[in-house]
Image (tube, grey):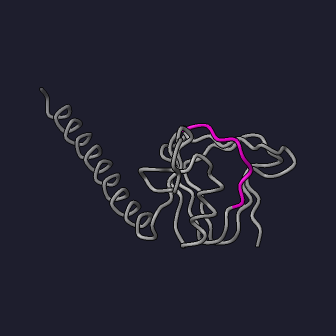
Amino acid sequence: MNKKIKEGIEKNKSIVLAILATLIVLSVVTAPRLMAKGTVFVDADASGTMDGSEEHPFDNIQDAIDKASEKGRNVFIENGHYKDNLELWSDIELVGEERGKVIIEGKNDDEPVILMYDDSEVHNLVLREGKNGVRVKR
């Protein structure tokens, strides 16, 4: 193998290792921040007893938001399809399990899919229908 090919392979290995290290650091930094406040869980397929715990998640995102607002927690949403218009209170973070796989479709076409207040955040969500995707209210 000539010298240029070997250098190219080593350079690509370095890039891959740098990307992997970045992903690990991001997961280590983000996960504790999400869990530090406590988390309320949502799963579209949940049934039976629902208290928002990881073992007994809500099947409705707004119920999880309301519970999270009582205790200053965040909301983790399992992959799935949800139909609702949401009101996201201040200091709550909505986090979808996987980008492109948590779909929230507005139930009411005259309202935004998510009405957000200052200091709230959304991540990894696909928003459809509704008057608009997100409206921020101060």
Farthest residue toward the right? 110
Q: Is residue 82 magenta?
A: yes
Above or below for 124 versus 28? above
Farthest residue toward the front? 48
- Look at the image and tell me in which quarter the N terminus lies: top left
Overall secondary structure of the magenta section = strand
User: Relative to 39, is 21 on the left or the right?
Assistant: left
**Percent of width and height locating residue 127:** 68, 44
**Percent of width and height locating residue 94:** 57, 57
Q: Measuring 67% from the left and 62% from the top, which residue is drawn there?
A: 88
User: Relative to 108, is 126 on the left or the right?
Assistant: left
The region drawn magenta spans 80-87
User: Relative to 55, is 21 on the left or the right?
Assistant: left
Depth check: 137 or 78 in front? Answer: 78
Total tally of numbered discs in the picture: 0
Above or below for 61 versus 32? above
User: Relative to 58, is 37 on the left or the right?
Assistant: left
**Percent of width and height locating residue 66:** 64, 63
Location of residue 92 (image quadrant): bottom right
Q: Measuring 57% from the left and 40% from the top, which residue is drawn there?
A: 44
Depth check: 80 or 121 in front? Answer: 80
Q: Is residue 77 magenta?
A: no
Location of residue 7 (image quadrant): top left
Farthest residue toward the top? 1
**Percent of width and height locating residue 58:** 55, 50
Q: Measuring 76% from the left and 73% from the top, which residue is drawn there?
A: 138
Depth check: 58 or 97 in front? Answer: 58
Q: Measuring 33% from the left and 54% from the top, which residue is drawn there?
A: 22
Farthest residue toward the left? 1
